[in-house]
Amino acid sequence: MNKNSIIKHFATIGGGTIIVLLVNIITVPIITRLVDPGEYGLQSIFTMYATLAASFLYLGQDQSLLRFFYIKEGEEYKRTLLYRCIKYPLLLCVVAIGVVFVIKWSNIFEDKYENWILICLCIYTTVLVIDRFASLLLRLTYNTKMFSAVNIVYRLSYLLVSVALICWVRSYYSQILIITTTVAAILSMVLNIFCQRNLWRFKKGCNDRDCVSSLDILKYGMPFIISSGVASIFNVTDKMVVKAYGTYSDVGIYSSALSMVNAFAVIQTTFCTLWTPLTFENYEKDPDDRSLYIKGHNIITIIVFAAGLTMICGKDIFVYMLGEKYREASYLLPFLIFNPIMYTVSETTVSGLYFMKKSNMQIIPSLVACIVNLVGNIILVQMLGYKGAAISTGLSYIVFFTVRTVLGRYYYYIGFNLKSYYIMTAFFIIYAVYNTFFPFNVCTIIGYFLCLLILILLYRQTMKEILFYFRDIIQNR
């Protein structure tokens, strides 16, 4: 893929993500002003359980689809590969639903959830599993316009339906949010499948003899069951500990801060959506070419750190929109921002594990970070409340980045400028600590420009290349 084509795809996804971001900026404040933190927290716990369950039910076959997609061209090959990747996760979903309701109706364990909530949970989880493969196909085929369009429709449908029902019913808010979340997910899944319907027509034939065997697909994907599961536990540990030591209201405030951090979606989604398939395609064509990975690492580092600093500096403006009941969320943003920063940049440094098919090693970064996060949350939440959860989660993502980077470079060495990266991370931590415990003041502004200056100096060569690139575009036009 040439440079202009890459930029075009990034621009398409970026434009779509900006619209999704704007919808989020509208959605979250409206919901938080209409719904109490306790109700919002209950819906967050619902999505947490579904996401956690789906991470195991994928069976790692989504990663197999990603890894083997570019090995051979042809619609029949890709249809066969999709069929072999998705059949076992779907079968496991059916078995899991049966087990859940057998346990529920046999009263083996006491539970406080009504039948309709369990039904929604089962439907929503299954939809997440199918939609994972459907949306991944859009990414792999570079169908960026439809990928962006479906994301916009998903967020708009959630906003319009939830607000309409809340204003109409004026009660049962958590139930409305749960139902709306499920309906919006179903709509997203249907649209994603429709966009690549030719690959979903399994009756046309899924018998490509040159396709990767089901056994090889399972062998590659199975280690991701543990790594994805541990990663999901890592991602929800903070909420679980906040709930254990607090209330649904605390979870609601904490989740509202996480929702505002989703403003990073404009960067993280845009980059990660195209980066992984782009690197696989580049590796298959020229395994010795490492220039793309270094340039991508430097550029995304500048972007995410600059955006993170800007968001911390303006955190009070973001959180003001949530309403008075959620105002404390502003002090959670500085460390929660480490999540998208470290994860996004680690996608450039972990490539070696994917290229060398070391799927079993993917378990280690998530497991180490999960243990650090759990211990940190238990200690800090008791001392600092949900601020402690945010600090622990942020620092754990630095550990996650470090372990991913060490392993990725061990199996496929790439000469990243890690010294500059960790210097910038150290200054970012200092700035985050200050803004976690102190309100906006003159020092916030001084610290912001000082950190930006350090970022520019550390990556001055990449900054020059970016400026020259845009200069050339302007001159050509």
Image (tube, helix red, strand yellow):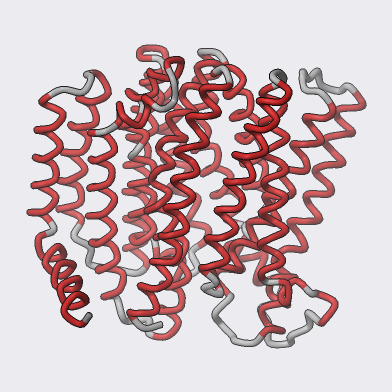
Q: Quadrant of residue 104?
A: top right
Q: Where is residue 72 shown, x and y percent of the image?
A: 59, 85
Residue under the image location 58 percent in, 17 percent down = 38
Examine the rendering and report whether any part of residue 52 can be seen.
Answer: no
Examine the rendering and report whether any part of residue 470 can be seen.
Answer: yes
Q: Where is residue 144 shown, x and y percent of the image?
A: 51, 68
Q: Between 117 and 357, which is closer to the camera in this rendering?
A: 117
Residue under the image location 63 percent in, 57 percent down = 132
Q: Quadrant of residue 412?
A: bottom left
Residue under the image location 78 percent in, 20 percent down = 111
Q: Is residue 272 above or below residue 277?
A: above
Residue under the image location 61 percent in, 68 percent down = 137
Q: Which quadrant would the C terminus be assigned to in this image?
A: bottom left
Q: Is residue 339 above or below residue 268?
A: above
Q: Is residue 441 left or right of residue 365?
A: left
Q: Where is residue 375 shown, x and y percent of the image?
A: 42, 26
Residue with the most extreme right position: 106
Q: Which quadrant would the N terminus be assigned to in this image?
A: bottom left
Q: Is residue 106 above or below residue 304?
A: above
The number of numbered discs placed on residues in the rendered structure image is 0
Q: Quadrant of residue 80?
A: bottom right
Q: Where is residue 150 shown, x and y percent of the image?
A: 60, 58
